[in-house]
Image (cartoon, rainbow, N blue to C red):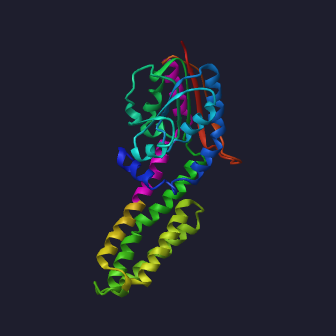
Amino acid sequence: MTMTGEQPWSDFWQGEGDEASVASRRASTAFASLWREWSTELFEQQSDPVILDAACGAGSVSREVIAAAQQADPVIVSVDIAYSALKKLEDAPVLRATADAAALPFAEGSFDAIASQYGVEYAGQEALEALPALLAPHGRIRVLAHIKEGAIAQECSDNLTVLNSLRERELIQRVSELFQALRGLRPDLESCDAAFRLVAQACGREVQTRACPASTYAQRLFQDCATVLQRNQAYDPKDMQVWFEGQAQSIDAYAARMSAMLSAALDRSQIETVLQVWQRHGMADCTVKPVYAAADDTPAAWRLDAVRRS
């Protein structure tokens, strides 16, 4: 399962992305100092750099760069495939552009610096490898990328397990069938009730074994479904059919986001390949290290740094 094109990401950001990854949001807060330090060093060398925030999402990196600018006067170009993400930067002094990180529409040497946090790797390893071509001489790159088997990957894996339990056991379908039977729209009330109870128990066990955002999401969904069944006479069947379809689509979309995060995560060999390609494209001082969020024992991201030779 992958998320390709603009629409899935647009839907994600329109929904605020609240449930996507608690660990990811925690990491973004912890990473703020890394971007302030990187930006400050950049401004010490150049007061008016042109900076690309690639696959910027809601713009957390762009805002950290702005906060560090002080007397500097940077031009920040914030780019994302989803316009709904860029709308969250309407109040920020940045240039916004909608574009796929796999095919950024800029000429070679357009930027003095390139930043990305949990972004470009979604477009594939090749998208990361292509970034140096956009740098001017002496330009620098910093990327914070998803790390395979890291804290966020583990959380996403737990989320996906819970969501797949809901999907594979067809929880929403069983609730819909029981609702219809309770309303007298189908004759098999007893069998519908038995099927729903079996599925609810199985899904409930999966939820209880994992402390993750998807478990909280599933618990809210269980409560909503229980309310619908208990108050079945209060709801119009046609309206409820739309609601059931919407809930099933929400589960699928959430699972797609988790799958995309897991697919985007890079292992050590992939990261080293990226750095080798960067070096072949004239990048120097190429370094990679795992970074951590708060007191987590498991790394949350790879940090890649490099500078383009003159």
Horizontal and vertical percent for residue 49? Answer: 54, 23
In magenta, the rendered stretch is 252-280
Horizontal and vertical percent for residue 193? Answer: 40, 83
Between 116 and 212, the one lying in front of the other is 116
Between 25 and 262, the one lying in front of the other is 25
Horizontal and vertical percent for residue 164? Answer: 45, 61
- Name the image quarter holding the C terminus: top right
The part of the image, by quadrant, that contains residue 98 is top left
Q: Residue at x 63, y 40 (%)?
A: 32
Residue 172 to residue 287: above or below: below
Q: Residue at x 52, y 38 (%)?
A: 266
Predominant secondary structure, magenta span:
helix
Visible residue check, residue 150: yes
The part of the image, by quadrant, that contains residue 300 is top right
Between 181 and 250, the one lying in front of the other is 250
Residue 29 is covered by the magenta coloring: no
Q: Residue at x 32, y 74 (%)?
A: 239
**Residue that lies at the very extreme toward the top in this rendered image:** 310
Horizontal and vertical percent for residue 11? Answer: 40, 53
Residue 256 is covered by the magenta coloring: yes
